[in-house]
Image (spheres, helix red, strand yellow):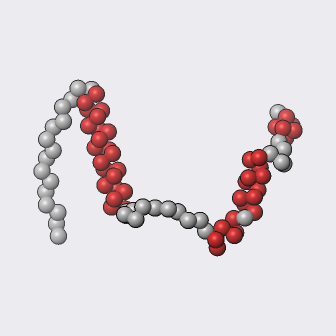
Amino acid sequence: MEKNQVKRMSMFSKSFCKGFVGGFTSPANIFLGSKIKRPVEFDGSVERAWREVGRNLSDATRSYGESIGKAPTRTKKHRPRAA
């Protein structure tokens, strides 16, 4: 079985050439880099990421609850945080 796979491999296949060129030019990419375009108001903070995770989790549990016929209940009031 391995012999069949080796026979089919080509050193001039498109994927091999792309990977070889990418690996060969990778040291130059450290110095040249690539430009990543982001919106001016981009917020890459950890706080925003966790806020988004919480929002997605809340939306998922709400939609699942609605799909099984449970109405959302009021949330308990949170205790104030210690200073």
Relative to the observer, which residue lies in front, 42 or 67? 42
Q: Position of residue 36 (x, y in %)?
A: 52, 63
77 left or right, relative to 53: left
Residue at figure coordinates x 69%, y 70% from the top left = 28
Q: From this viewpoint, is residue 44 visible?
A: no
Kindly indicate the quadrant of the structure image that contains residue 59.
Answer: top left
Assign the N terminus to one quadrant of the image.
top right
Which residue does the image show at 75% across and 58% down from the upper left?
21
- 35 sits to left or right of 52: right
The residue furthest bottom is 31
Given residues 76 and 27, the one toward you in this image is 27
User: Is residue 79 visible to us here?
Assistant: yes
Looking at the image, is 41 positioned above or below residue 2?
A: below
Q: Give the camera-side residue of 1 and 16.
A: 16
If the image is split into quadrants, where does the C terminus sit?
Answer: bottom left
Q: Quadrant of residue 5?
A: top right
Give coordinates of residue 11: x percent, y percent: 84, 48
Residue 38 image point, x, y percent: 46, 61
Nearer to us in this view, 28 or 76: 28
- Image point (70%, 69%), residue name: 27
Residue at left 76%, top 56%? 20
